[in-house]
Image (spheres, rainbow, N blue to C red):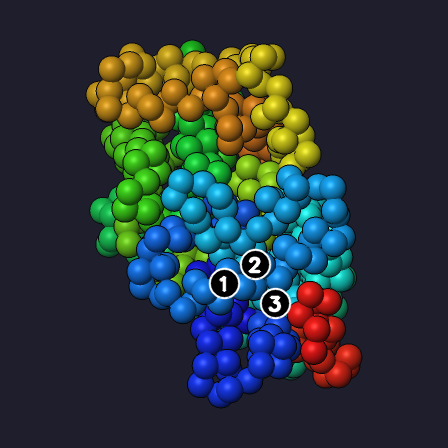
Amino acid sequence: QLNETHPAIAIPEFMRLLIDEEGLSWEEAWQIVYNTFAYTNHTVMPEALEVWPVPLVEKLLPRHLMIIYEINHRFLTEVRQRWPDDPQRVARMSIIEESEPKLVRMAHLAIIGCHKVNGVAEIHTNLLRNALFPDFSAMWPDKFENITNGVNARRWLLQANPALSAVISKWVGNHEWIHDLGTLASLSRIAFDPELQRDWREAKRYNKRLLAAFIDKTCGIAVDSSAMFDVQVKRIHEYKRQFMNILSVAYRYLRLLSLLEGGRAEEVQRVVPRVVIFAGKAAADYVIAKDVIRMILDVAETINGDDRIGNLLKVVFIPNYNVSLAEVLIPGADVSQQISTAGMEASGTSNMKFAMNGALLLGSRDGANLEIESAIGRDNIFMFGATAKEVERLRSTMQYRKPQMDSRLKLVLEEMAKGRFGARLSQDGPISQLIDTLKPGKDTYMVGHDFGAYLEANEVMDCVFRQEEQWTAKCIASCCAMSRFSSDRCIREYVITISLSLSLSRLSSVPVLFPS
């Protein structure tokens, strides 16, 4: 199974071994190779669709390049036979990009050399078929499959969250759920049971106290464990929109100041105290992602240092995010933010891990969020923002029909420009290029477009959090509907769809340009 495009070099390497060292004919070797490999695409981002300079491949792997050229020649022969009057299609589908220098399109090599290609969520697989690789999908429609990601409940619930696991086992009456999450459906039917809710909340409080102690020890920030723990943990990237999250936190802070300075005590009392927790790493050369981290730290310093706010709002960035840290963060979260730009997150798995642990999702209409919404019910998830199709349309029109910026976002940017959140975020500060991405016509990741809907989803979330019974019932329902996102189901589908498909068909039929 080729995960992403860099291991696609295994295709010409296997051909080399079979032809040069085992003495097989091209046709015999290709039948074995084609039926050996399958390709899983995990992201539509360009950095994962690798292109290798031909001069570099020629220098390091000359025999492999010869084989790649031969694969490409035979493949394009069939393309020309299928579409004789379409040279543009031939150029689009070629393994070799005729640029300067020429490039090897590793994704094309993977698709051509594999008997199956799959995406990792329904929306992602549809994007592969219709947007990323439409020519290949037209040629081989049965080659493309969807296998939605899954996570291991034995690791991410049983091991990571023993407190909640004990509650589940007590109320289910056995430990069978460890091997079959479908058995948890019985709990969702009694989600409002007062004793179940009491046990569930006690497990959550225990995990939140552990997380609060960890934050105090690691970051030196004291947080109130009774506040809403609002968590966004993932790789720092523009499309994952930690930027939008911290901008909304800055607005929340400004709103709180307005209430306090206006003497509106009753409204202040209705504010849900919130601890906003970030963690994640940026690629070493990804300047804007690092600027997002700097912005989070600067906004956090301003808010955490303002005694007027107290425990109504705290912001934490936990360094050195890793799996061990995730096992502390995920059980202690009340909310998980899954807010990527629609059409850009292939699936995500942290959304599954958080929901499995009884956190509610604040999500964009992207990746596996849509399938989770279908599984747990739209009343148990806080969704917002543009769809993937709407994002595509907005990007094509924003250059000549510049959108209006939300007034609340405009307020945040004005206060940042004045230096409210530190010199680095001021008008002449070093992070100005990050702010520049919000200007009308440059909002590639829909931060400005979705900002208003995002704030409104946060307000709805606050309203529900105030209703303890409603919130707990939603958490129970969310956890108990996650069997669809178990790695057991996922692995089973890989076996049936990818591996057993060969046995069932007595080897997949090889493209006609490679006759056996």
The mark that comes first in sequence, 2 or 3, is 2
**Which residue occupies the foreground of this view, 39 or 468?**
39
Q: CA distance from mark 3 to mark 1?
A: 14 Å
Note whether 467 is above or below 59 in the view shown.
above
* Structural crowding at the residue carrying mark 1, measured as other residues with C-alpha within 10 Å and reported as few (<14), some (14–19) or many (≥20): many
Residue 269 shows up from this direction: no
Number of marks: 3
Q: Are marks 1 and 2 in contact (CB under 8 Å)?
A: yes
Which residue is pictured at 45% across the width and 81% down the height?
20
**Which residue occupies the foreground of this view, 72 or 33?**
72
**Which residue occupies the foreground of this view, 426 or 61?**
61
The mark that comes first in sequence, 3 or 1, is 1
Front of the two marks 3 and 1: 1
* Structural crowding at the residue carrying mark 3, measured as other residues with C-alpha within 10 Å and reported as few (<14), some (14–19) or many (≥20): many
Q: Which residue is mark 2?
A: 72
Front of the two marks 2 and 3: 2
Residue 117 marker = none
Which residue is pictured at 67% across the width and 30% down the height?
390
Indicate the quadrant where residue 343 lies: top right
Q: Which residue is mark 3?
A: 114
Q: Amino acid at mark 3?
A: Cys
Provide the secondary structure element on which disc 1 rests.
helix
Provide the secondary structure element on which disc 2 rests.
helix
Q: Which residue is mark 1?
A: 68
Q: CA distance from mark 2 to mark 3?
A: 14 Å
Q: Amino acid at mark 1?
A: Ile
Q: CA distance from mark 1 to mark 2?
A: 6 Å
